[in-house]
């Protein structure tokens, strides 16, 4: 774990073809905090996650990683970002272990026990040598969480990480996310499971129709706050 | 440098492992190569002298079409669950990604052509001396290299376009035509059916193409993969 | 005022185009060896140059776009390809007519012909990509890489075909040309060059206007909060 990383969006907008998906959003994601990114469908949550991951470029505005604008990030800085997207980003024909080993190699991960311990952590030790293509959505989701956590990212972007997980899986995932934040990562969490989100988020950013409706610490009931901002 | 190499090998080994395990691209390309062989053979078979003349053309048609099928499939595994995003997001040097993909494609095409090239020769009742066969193989290797250094980066780009499977050959075939001319004429010279001094000058031309486009792709690739 | 000047210029260009045709079909003497078909060259040769010019602009615009993703550079590239392609098709239509009459065949595998044909094919692919591939940023990037890859290709094709055939006819506008023919040729060249500039500027403007309309639409949707 290197120095803590604060990520800041400054006046960020993103255009697709004719439409603004995100309009003039300011936000800050600080180390050790779990920010819940909330909003109804089409609010621009996934777009903001894509921009934070550097896979997308803002049409206007800048995203700063510490003091560095996103477009000037080098490979070493990219290595500090962990990203779980809508798709699992895995290779179906490879086994769970091979998937993690491969991504470990890309990140220069030398510790051979890391893969084994992560597999055990997400409860896949029994299925470690089965191809990921045969996994249920929940199992694949556990594996992709392990993939994102493998390089011990300083910025952890989780776009619907609880998809397909059973109750036990959700508890496990929340625990791992909390752990990452405790170790100093800035975590951004998008999830439709509001009550699960409420148990670990200490900050919240609410978007509606591409605009920021609320940003701040979670005070009181997150679910009530959300409905007040979005429906009110 | 060693980190660079280890990433390069990791990606290449991953691609080969994925391919050998699923065998889908290899199987499709080989079968397609056989179908092409049959069509070319019964379309072109004639007297022994003519067969010798048409052989290089038939061979390079097979190379182009099986190659186009191959590079189109390269990114199917990457796109299936969007693993390519994770690859681009990782600290892996972009040049290492491209080179691993190029080498992987080259191996795939060569495996198929190693079956198809002798098969077409057999179907056309041709006999080659060892030297002739060696020159054909060398030309084929360098032409295939030229094909993949152009086709691989464009296949990456094509994933963002509609009608990618039609657009890719449309774009790649004219671009590799120098390799086509050079390979067909060079083999013709080697087999004594095309007038010309020595087959080595054609090899030089293909090699120059490989170097120019290989270097160009590497220089541009980091500008290609990100928005 | 500006509008009137523009219309006057356009009228002048139309007159000049008529004049060019009159020169080609009435004024110049018939070439004694090749006969009447030689008259194709007054349009064929300038069109070949303008085709190259269009694609040079596309190449420059594409390099610019890959470098800094400037929409202006992309509009230059697209306009260059569109207009270059128009002249390219003129070359590809008129060339074989002349070849059939003079060489007895519609087509010869000759370096200049082959590289021009490949150039037109590459940029036709570019055109198809830009028209049907979708208007996303990724497609613009794809087009730019294609144009950049296309440029050295022409040199390779030229060298390859030259090596293969050895023979190629010399320049058409030699020093021994009849003075009337020479005059007609350079007037045609000048008129077509102006036509190219006119078409290119108009195309570039339309592309930029389309972008501006898109931006306005987005502004509107932004004001409405999508």
Image: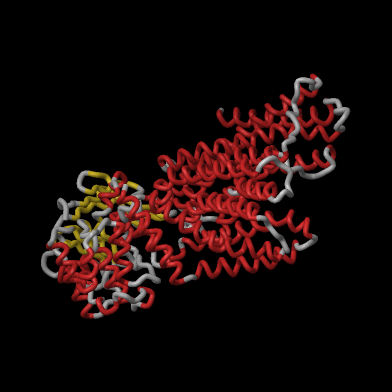
Tell me which colouring the rendered structure shows.
Answer: secondary structure
The relative height of residue B122 versus residue C107 in the rendered view (above or below) is: below
Location of residue A183 by image quarter: bottom left
Give percent across and percent down for residue C152. 56, 39
Apparent side of residue B161 relative to residue A160 in the rendered image (left or right): right
Location of residue B108 in the rendering, given as x and y in whole percent from the top left corner: 51, 61
- The percent coordinates of residue A39 (x first, y second) are 27, 65
Q: Is residue C71 left or right of residue A37?
A: right
Q: Can residue C78 be seen from the camera position used here? A: no
Number of marks in the image?
0
Looking at the image, which residue is at 33% across and 67% down? A99
- C21 is higher (above) or lower (below) than B90: above
Near-viewer residue (A191 or A155):
A155
* Residue C52 visible in rendering: yes
Is C106 situated above or below B119?
above
Please name whichever residue, A45 or B152, is drawn nearer the observer in this view of the structure. B152
Picture residue at 60% right of the left edge, 32% below the top? C197
- In the displayed orientation, state which residue is furthest to the front: B130
Q: Quadrant of the C terminus of chain A?
A: bottom left
Q: Quadrant of the N terminus of chain A?
A: bottom left
- Image position, residue A26 (x, y; %): 24, 51
């Amino acid at each position: 774990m290197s120095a803590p990383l604060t990520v800041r969006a400054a006046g960020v907008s993103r255009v697709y073809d004719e439409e603004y998906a995100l309009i003039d959003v300011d936000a800050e994601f600080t180390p050790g905090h779990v920010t819940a990114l909330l909003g109804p469908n089409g609010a621009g949550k996934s777009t903001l996650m894509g921009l934070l991951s550097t896979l997308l470029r803002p049409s206007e505005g800048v995203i700063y990683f510490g003091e560095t604008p996103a477009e000037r990030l080098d490979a070493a800085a990219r290595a500090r970002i962990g990203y779980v997207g809508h798709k699992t980003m895995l290779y179906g024909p490879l086994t769970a272990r091979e998937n993690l080993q491969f991504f470990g190699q890309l990140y220069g991960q030398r510790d051979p026990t890391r893969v084994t311990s992560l597999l055990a952590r997400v409860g896949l030790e029994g299925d470690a040598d089965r191809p990921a293509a045969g996994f249920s959505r929940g199992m694949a989701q556990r594996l992709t969480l392990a993939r994102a956590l493998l390089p011990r990212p300083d910025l952890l972007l989780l776009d619907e990480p609880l998809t397909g997980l059973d109750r036990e899986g959700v508890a496990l995932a929340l625990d791992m996310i909390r752990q990452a934040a405790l170790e100093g990562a800035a975590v951004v969490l998008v999830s439709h499971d509001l009550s699960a989100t409420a148990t670990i988020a200490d900050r919240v950013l609410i978007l509606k129709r591409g605009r920021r409706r609320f940003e701040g610490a979670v005070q009181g009931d997150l679910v009530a706050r959300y409905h007040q901002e979005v429906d009110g | 440098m060693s980190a660079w190499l280890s990433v390069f090998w990791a990606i290449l080994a991953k691609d080969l492992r994925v391919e050998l395990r699923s065998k889908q691209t290899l199987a499709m390309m080989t079968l397609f190569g056989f179908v092409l062989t049959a069509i070319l053979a019964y379309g072109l078979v004639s007297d022994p002298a003519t067969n010798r003349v048409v052989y290089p053309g038939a061979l390079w048609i097979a190379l182009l079409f099986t190659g186009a099928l191959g590079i189109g499939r390269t990114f199917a595994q990457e796109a299936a669950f969007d693993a390519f995003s994770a690859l681009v997001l990782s600290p892996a040097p972009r040049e290492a990604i491209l080179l691993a993909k190029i080498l992987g494609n080259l191996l795939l095409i060569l495996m198929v052509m190693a079956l198809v090239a002798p098969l077409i020769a057999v179907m056309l009742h041709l006999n080659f001396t060892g030297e002739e066969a060696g020159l054909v193989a060398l030309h084929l290797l360098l032409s295939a290299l030229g094909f993949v250094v152009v086709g691989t980066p464009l296949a990456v780009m094509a994933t963002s376009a509609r009608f990618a499977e039609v657009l890719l050959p449309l774009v790649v075939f004219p671009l590799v035509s120098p390799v086509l001319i050079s390979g067909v004429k060079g083999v013709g010279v080697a087999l004594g059916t095309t007038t010309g001094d020595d087959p080595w000058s054609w090899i030089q031309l293909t090699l120059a193409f490989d170097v120019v486009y290989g270097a160009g792709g590497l220089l541009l690739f980091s500008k290609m993969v990100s928005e | 005022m500006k509008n009137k000047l523009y219309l006057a210029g356009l009228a002048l260009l139309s007159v000049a185009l008529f004049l060019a045709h009159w020169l080609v079909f009435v004024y110049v003497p018939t070439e004694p060896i090749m006969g009447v078909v030689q008259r194709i060259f007054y349009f064929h040769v300038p069109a070949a140059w303008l085709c190259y010019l269009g694609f040079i602009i596309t190449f420059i615009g594409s390099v610019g776009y890959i470098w800094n993703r400037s929409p202006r550079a992309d509009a230059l590239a697209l306009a260059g390809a569109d207009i270059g392609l128009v002249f390219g098709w003129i070359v590809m239509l008129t060339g074989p007519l002349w070849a059939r009459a003079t060489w007895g065949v519609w087509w010869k595998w000759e370096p200049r012909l082959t590289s021009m044909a490949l150039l037109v094919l590459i940029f036709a692919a570019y055109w198809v990509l830009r028209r049907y591939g979708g208007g996303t940023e990724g497609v613009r990037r794809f087009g730019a890489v294609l144009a950049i890859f296309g440029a050295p290709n022409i040199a390779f094709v030229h060298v390859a075909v030259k090596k293969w055939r050895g023979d190629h006819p010399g320049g058409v506008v030699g020093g021994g040309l009849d003075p009337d023919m020479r005059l007609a040729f350079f007037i045609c060249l000048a008129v077509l060059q102006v036509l190219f500039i006119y078409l290119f500027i108009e195309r570039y403007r339309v592309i930029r206007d389309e972008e501006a309309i898109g931006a306005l639409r987005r502004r509107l949707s932004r004001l409405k909060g999508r």
